[in-house]
């Protein structure tokens, strides 16, 4: 059985700081989406240490499906090579505001420290 680990800022959860997300009345159509830029995101540096992202974008549809993308310049891996992280390698869940927690995420940190986190949730 996988051990569940919570990672991030105060609540130790990978990704976005939990914020209430209300879909506005004008976004009630089934094809509507809410875009949230720079709400705050935590990802991993090349050595697996939690780090604040410098930019993030969340898109959540009115059905609750969501995508989160975060980027940051972080400390590169001590190995000198690119590092990749996901649920299978860390046991961590990702949180998408309005989309809940998911194990469908992937992060890549280049050898120079460019980090990109992608997180996908479906309701």
Image (cartoon, rainbow, N blue to C red):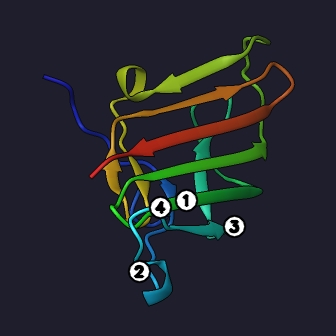
| First in sequence: mark 2 vs mark 3 | 2
Instruction: Check disc 3 and report the residue beneath it.
Output: 38
Q: What label sits on residue 60 in the rendered view?
A: 4
| Real-space CA distance between mark 2 and mark 3, rounded to the nearest whole angstrom | 15 Å
Instruction: Give the mark toward the camera: 4 or 3.
Output: 4
Q: Nearer the viewer, residue 37 or 7?
A: 37
Give the residue displayed 73% in from the left and 46% down from the top: 71
Instruction: Check disc 2 and report the residue beneath it.
Output: 20
Give the residue displayed 36% in from the left and 59% down from the top: 99
Give the vertical position of 88 relative to 67 (above or below): above
1 and 4 marks in contact (CB < 8 Å): yes
Residue 112: quadrant of the picture: top right
Helix, strand, or loop for circle 2?
loop
Is any atom of residue 50 visible in this view?
Answer: no
Count neighbours of disc 3 (C-alpha within 10 A) and say few if under 14, some if 14 to 19, many if 20 or more: few
Instruction: Give the mark toward the camera: 3 or 1.
Output: 1
| First in sequence: mark 2 vs mark 1 | 2
């Amino acid at each position: 059985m996988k051990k569940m680990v919570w990672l991030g800022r105060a609540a130790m959860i990978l990704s976005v700081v939990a914020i209430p997300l209300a879909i506005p009345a004008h976004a009630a159509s089934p094809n509507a989406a809410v875009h949230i830029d720079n709400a705050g995101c935590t990802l991993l540096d090349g050595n697996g240490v939690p780090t604040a992202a410098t930019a993030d974008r969340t898109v959540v549809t009115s059905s609750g499906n969501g995508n989160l993308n975060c980027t940051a310049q972080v400390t590169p891996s001590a190995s000198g090579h690119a590092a990749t992280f996901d649920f299978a390698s860390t046991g961590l869940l990702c949180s998408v505001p309005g989309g809940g927690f998911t194990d469908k995420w992937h992060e890549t940190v280049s050898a120079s420290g460019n980090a990109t986190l992608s997180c996908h949730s479906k309701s």
